[in-house]
Image (cartoon, helix red, strand yellow):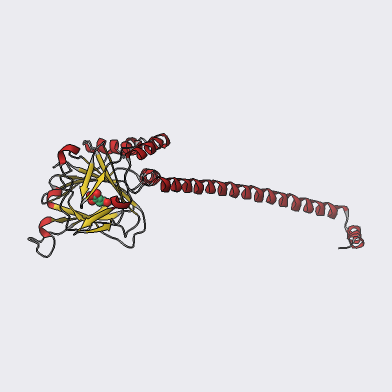
Amino acid sequence: MSVPKINKIKKHLDPGNRYTVMLFVTFIGVTSLRKCCFIYHDVNKELHNDFARIDTVMMDKFLVNKRKLESADDFDENHHTKKYKQEANDYEALSIKTLIIRPLKWRDLRAENLDCDYGILFSKVNADRILCQCERMLNYNEGQLAKVKIFGKWHDIPRKQVAHGDPGLSYTFSNNTVPARPWTPFLDDIRDAVSDVTGHSFDFVLINRYKNGCDHMGEHRDDEKDLVHGYPIASLSLGQPRDFIFKHADSRGKKAKRSIEPLKLLLEHGSLLLMKHPTNTYWYHALPQRKRLLGVRINMTFRQMVPASNSGNKTTKPKAELP
Ligand SMILES: O=C(O)CCC(=O)C(=O)O
């Protein structure tokens, strides 16, 4: 608008109208200024979040790279001892025992020669925290240690696996011997919690990670010579709930002697299943594929092993089932 035109408008405005216009212009100005402030604040906040996200991603990348550099094909004790010392420094103790839901409600699972207890140990929030720590701190076996021999042929196990335990312990199954890596403060913390609720001590943990519903474990009995006969096995589940199937030994295969219905149990996030004697003498168990399930699941089975020198279990018969 040209200056003469503005002057013309001014002339027609009486003082009252001028004040109204001035007020209106001031209001518009203040509102715009506030809007600018808000936009600045939002942009600032977004940038801050982005930097935080970048930090996390970089940290994750760093951890992944660190793991890649450190993952040896086979187990090297000195190498890992150094690494665990580092982890011991990194671990912020969760004091997992204090996170257990109290009073803990056990469900009794009973069938012919099957005796198990099942309960939810951790709330979702706490189970999430423990699962996150697992994902941050656990490293899995690779190479030959991640294979099993079935009917003379080596197969990659359809999941990831690692074992930790007291010095010198190992677990031989499906013609492969998995040595125990040393306990870490984190795993010791979990073991302590599991011992606390079951009243049993454990010197070995086998950890299985199922990246999604395609990863699985075949029928087996956990009856190897390395395990103390008759000792309960405590199985902690974190992440994606998965079906766990018990099948009686007499009712398996085409030559089944009897017809006994399999038992299905959903292993929930934060749950503990205690398999007591004689369950694993008579019943096989499996974690079958569930292809539509996408979530990660980590399972830890706490066990008591025969001392290394007594088991004499260096080569066992191959199992008839896929792991
Ligand atoms: O992941 C599971 O729940 C199965 C674990 C299991 O059967 C085993 O470790 O022997």
Q: Is residue 306 left or right of residue 127?
A: left
Q: How many marks?
A: 0
Identify the residue at image location x=20%, y=58%: 150
As rendered, which of 249 and 146 lies closer to the eye? 146
Q: Does residue 214 lie above or below 124 as drawn? A: below
Q: Position of residue 41 (x, y in %)?
A: 64, 47
Residue positioned 24% across, 54% down in the render: 148
Quadrant of the image for the C terminus?
bottom left
Q: Residue at x 16, y 41 (%)?
A: 311
Farthest left residue?
A: 257
> Is 30 placed left or right of 116 in the picture?
right
Q: Nearer the viewer, residue 10 or 84?
A: 84
Query: Farthest residue in the bottom direction?
Result: 254
In the picture provided, is 238 more to the left or to the right than 55? left
Could you tell me if residue 153 is visible in this image? Answer: yes
In the image, residue 70 sits, relative to residue 188, either above or below, namely below
List x then y, in percent, for residue 314: 18, 46
Which residue is at a point 14% across and 44% down the rendered structure image? 277
Tell me if I can see residue 244 in this picture. Answer: no
Q: Nearer the viewer, residue 108 or 74?
A: 74
Location of the N terminus (image quadrant): bottom right
User: As drawn, is 153 to the left or to the right of 86?
Assistant: left
Question: Residue 253, located in which quarter of the rendered image?
Answer: bottom left
Question: In the rendering, at what x and y percent does residue 11 appear?
Answer: 91, 58
